[in-house]
Image (spheres, helix red, strand yellow):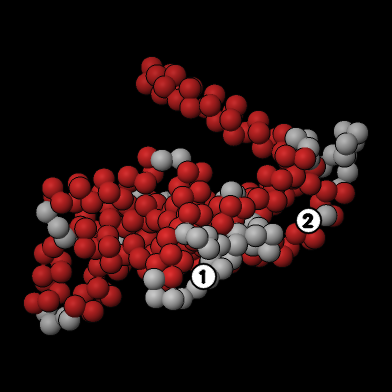
Amino acid sequence: MKKSFLSKLINAPYILWSAIFIVVPLIIVAYFTFTNKNGSFSLENIYEIPDYTGIFLRSIIYALVATAITLVVSYPFAYFMSRTKVRTQSMMIMLVMLPMWMNLLIRTYSWTTILEKTGLINSFFGLFGLGPYNLIGTSGAVIVGMVYNYLPYMILPIYTSMSKIDKSYIEAAKDLGSSSFDSLKRVILPLTLPGIISGITMVFVPSVSTFYIADKLGSTKTLMIGDVIQKKFDIDVYSGIGASLSLVLMVIILICIVFMNRFSDSEDGGIIV
């Protein structure tokens, strides 16, 4: 009984934090979703949601593409990092985390100086008489911004899973005649699946709900749902349509998390709650 009381006492700050900063805001969002400006129950905000279907689809597609690119880049990098010396691994982890020490707004804004017509890339092409190319304000620029900002969230979970693999498993596979590709397919990939699932979730969720990146690196044709929600609340802090879009976005994210958790192993840290 004392242990039960002690556990409740220890968990009390977390429960209070969750209630104040998670449950209460969700209730507020739901309230403004299903009420009009007079505070009366109304579904008019729900009826406007189909008008933003295209933006929702664009956000999901951009997030999927960015997630796929980060996975393709991160997997071989994490594998190489896990096979180096411990001191080298620590240095590489620090280099991966170094950009995260800066604010996301600063990291995103720095890409404007790289992609704009007088930026570093066009200046390089100019040396060969090429360009300038219109790089900024495109969907490619938005995806590049998301990949750059969320790449560490993919690398670290995969690296953690790979660092736990016993090297004797790979050696045993080779002794049994497996090629490097077979070892990757039948040994390394299954054992690192929890890290892959965790990384995909950690990249996709912030990507689909991101804002400022598309606003700064894209154009009106590449705006994502996070930017639309932000602009709605900039116009009116009590925006009902902004709240309804936020509620739909939250439902989409929850569905994605539940779906990804079905393929993860909670014992290896692959589950995201």
Quarter of image, res 220:
bottom right
In the rendered view, tell whether residue 229 sits above or below residue 40. Answer: below
Depth check: 199 or 104 in front? 104
- Whole-percent x, y for residue 222 in the image: 64, 62
For this view, does 150 lie left or right of residue 222? left
Q: Residue at x 21, y 58 (%)?
A: 81
- Looking at marks 2 and 1 on the same chain, the residue that comes earlier in the sequence is marked by 2
Q: Secondary structure at mark 2?
A: helix
- Furthest residue to the left? 175
Q: Is residue 205 visible?
A: no
Depth check: 176 or 22 in front? 22
Number of disc labels? 2
Depth check: 34 or 263 in front? 34
User: The disc labelled 1 sits on which kind of residue?
Assistant: Pro
For this view, does 236 lie left or right of residue 128? right
User: The disc labelled 2 sits on which kind of residue?
Assistant: Ile
Q: Residue at x 62, y 33 (%)?
A: 23
In the rendered view, tell whether residue 248 sits above or below residue 68. Answer: above
Q: Which residue is mark 2?
A: 49
- Whole-percent x, y for residue 215 in the image: 62, 53
